[in-house]
Image (cartoon, rainbow, N blue to C red):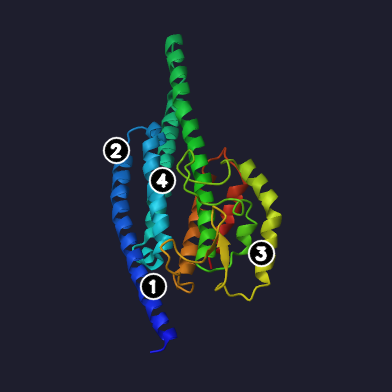
Amino acid sequence: MGPRRRVDTKNSAKAQQQALQTLAQARALHRETQELEAQFTQTLRNFTSSRQYFDEGLHQLRQTIVQNYTKIVFIAYEYAIEKEIEVHLWRAGFYMIIEACRAGLRKRQSRSTKATSQGGVNVNIADADTNIQDDVIRSQPVDKLKIFLDSFLYEATGFYLCLLRRMFSELGMKCPEYLNLCGIAAPMSFTEGPTSFGLSLTTSGTRSDARSNYDNNRGQSEKENSRDSRDSGSYKNTRYSDREGNSRSRETEGGTSVNTHHPAVNESVHRSLIFLGDLARYHDGLSDARGPIFSSAHSFYFQVR
């Protein structure tokens, strides 16, 4: 056996051992996160007031679930596909909160409509004052819940745009033009620092800031796309900068190379696009909330081929 072959065999054994360690790490993290997800689900079911949706502890728990499931996707992609980690990420990280808030809004709207239809008949001054006060108290949580849901949908949309970009970067796919021109994807990235609702963005969390940052960075983004288009089309030698600005080869956090031709990658991208479309649809239900991010996200439904 020649020296070169011995080196190759040694490297292969080392890579295999590293892959097994990464898989074990992913499994342990999955078990831990399953317990957190069960705790999160039970906590949400026990809520009796919409005000509890603002609970800081709940969103810290949810943030941990999101971070753990996201990590599993990128350190052990095949395992993540097998265990449907992306579905659990969507459900526990976003969907359950969204549906709870929407149910709360529907319930309050129903009560408000019923109170309005029954009001104004044989009511004395004292009763009228009480009814007015009750209406004011009742209307305040509705507004707060709408504001909360509006912000949550915005941050969830930002998360999935960033997740898509990371998939294209780390799973060896060229980021399509519609992501770069959607008005928010380019300047945002997923980090580990929490925002008010447990999501992590590089912007300050407002549409105007996102638009401003996008306009400032669009020129650089277009230059990068132009440079990519002149490449041979292979991502084998592609490198990218992580959030600290360090150049990294396209490897997972566990150090094992990603299978860039895994057949499930396209399904992951399509799934994220569908989630973005769902977020746009949910936002359409908030009649007084309008923003360019959601008209852009709406088009993601049409990108699923």
Instruction: Choose the circle earlier in sequence order: 4 or 1.
Output: 1
| Residue depicted at 61% across the width and 64% down the height | 176
Instruction: Choose the circle earlier in sequence order: 3 or 2.
Output: 2
Q: Nearer the viewer, residue 157 or 80?
A: 80
Q: Residue 76: in sight, yes or no?
A: yes
Inspect the image, locate mark 1, and give the three-letter code of the amino acid beneath it: Ala
Where is residue 243 shown, x and y percent of the image?
A: 54, 53
Q: Which residue is mark 4?
A: 63
Circle 1 crowding by C-alpha within 10 Å: few under 14, some 14–19, many from 20: some
User: Which SS class for mark 3?
Assistant: helix
User: Which SS class for mark 1?
Assistant: helix
Circle 4 crowding by C-alpha within 10 Å: few under 14, some 14–19, many from 20: many
Q: Which residue is mark 2?
A: 46
- Indicate the quadrant containing the N terminus: top left, top right, bottom left or bottom right: bottom left
Q: Which residue is mark 3?
A: 225
The single residue placed furthest to the top in the displayed view is 125
Circles 3, 1 touching at the beta carbon (< 8 Å): no
Circles 3, 2 touching at the beta carbon (< 8 Å): no
User: Which SS class for mark 2?
Assistant: loop
Instruction: In the rendered view, tell whether residue 87 sits above or below residue 258.
Output: above
- Determine the CA span between mark 3 and mark 1: 33 Å
Circle 2 crowding by C-alpha within 10 Å: few under 14, some 14–19, many from 20: few
Circle 3 crowding by C-alpha within 10 Å: few under 14, some 14–19, many from 20: some
| Residue depicted at 40% across the width and 76% down the height | 11
Q: Residue 96: in sight, yes or no?
A: no
Question: Which of the two discs, 4 and 1, sits closer to the camera?
Answer: 1
Inspect the image, locate mark 3, and give the three-letter code of the amino acid beneath it: Asn
Instruction: Choose the circle earlier in sequence order: 2 or 4.
Output: 2
User: Which SS class for mark 4?
Assistant: helix
Circles 2, 1 touching at the beta carbon (< 8 Å): no
Question: Which of the two discs, 3 and 2, sits closer to the camera?
Answer: 3
